[in-house]
């Protein structure tokens, strides 16, 4: 059998002890005691900032690479494919099986040679 937590034997006493402990911790932190620092150190802050900057640069470089590989024809083709996809969904929802099958065949990738 397990016993209930100590606080349930005399809850008011336990609550007062917790309150006193919290007050002591606050006093130590205000006085610059050994309490854990709430704010990260300057080095940690700088490190995180650098990591954030590097991540943004990487994302921008990836986006530039993607844009450089896409020509206007490819962009138009992607837009057309998205439009056909939405038409296929609409045909499915309205029950137009013939149109859905035609669009699905057009959207399927060509078989490998």
Image (cartoon, rainbow, N blue to C red):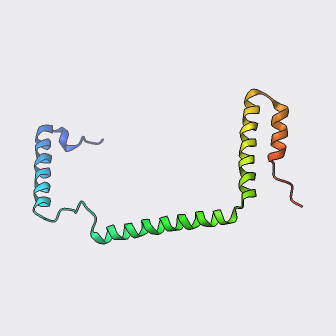
Of 86 and 110, which appears nearest the observer? 86
Image side of residue 14 versus residue 88, left or right? left
Which residue extends farthest top? 94
Does residue 96 sit above or below 103 in this rendering?
above
- What x and y, as percent, mark residue 88? 76, 37
Q: Quadrant of residue 31?
A: bottom left
Q: Quadrant of residue 106?
A: top right
Which residue extends farthest right? 113
- What x and y, as percent, mark residue 72? 72, 58
The quarter of the picture where the C terminus appears is: bottom right
Q: Identify the residue at horizontal 85%, vertical 33% (top origin).
A: 98
Q: Identify the residue at horizontal 82%, vertical 31% (top origin).
A: 97
Q: Identify the residue at horizontal 75%, vertical 27% (top origin).
A: 94
Q: How many marks?
A: 0
- What x and y, as percent, mark residue 42? 28, 70
- What x and y, as percent, mark residue 18? 15, 47
Q: Identify the residue at horizontal 10%, vertical 43% (top origin).
A: 16
The quarter of the picture where the N terminus appears is: top left
Of 63 and 24, which appears nearest the observer? 63
Image side of residue 2 versus residue 60, left or right? left
Image side of residue 69 versus residue 33, left or right? right
């Amino acid at each position: 059998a397990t016993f209930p937590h100590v606080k349930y034997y005399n809850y008011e006493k336990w609550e007062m002890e917790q309150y006193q402990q919290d007050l002591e911790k606050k006093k130590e932190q205000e006085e610059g005691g050994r309490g854990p620092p709430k704010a990260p150190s300057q080095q940690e802050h700088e490190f995180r900032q650098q990591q954030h900057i590097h991540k943004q640069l990487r994302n921008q470089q990836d986006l530039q690479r993607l844009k450089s590989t896409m020509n206007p024809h490819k962009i138009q083709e992607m837009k057309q494919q998205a439009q056909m996809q939405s038409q296929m969904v609409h045909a499915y929802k309205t029950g137009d099986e013939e149109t859905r099958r035609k669009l699905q065949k057009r959207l399927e990738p060509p078989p490998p040679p």
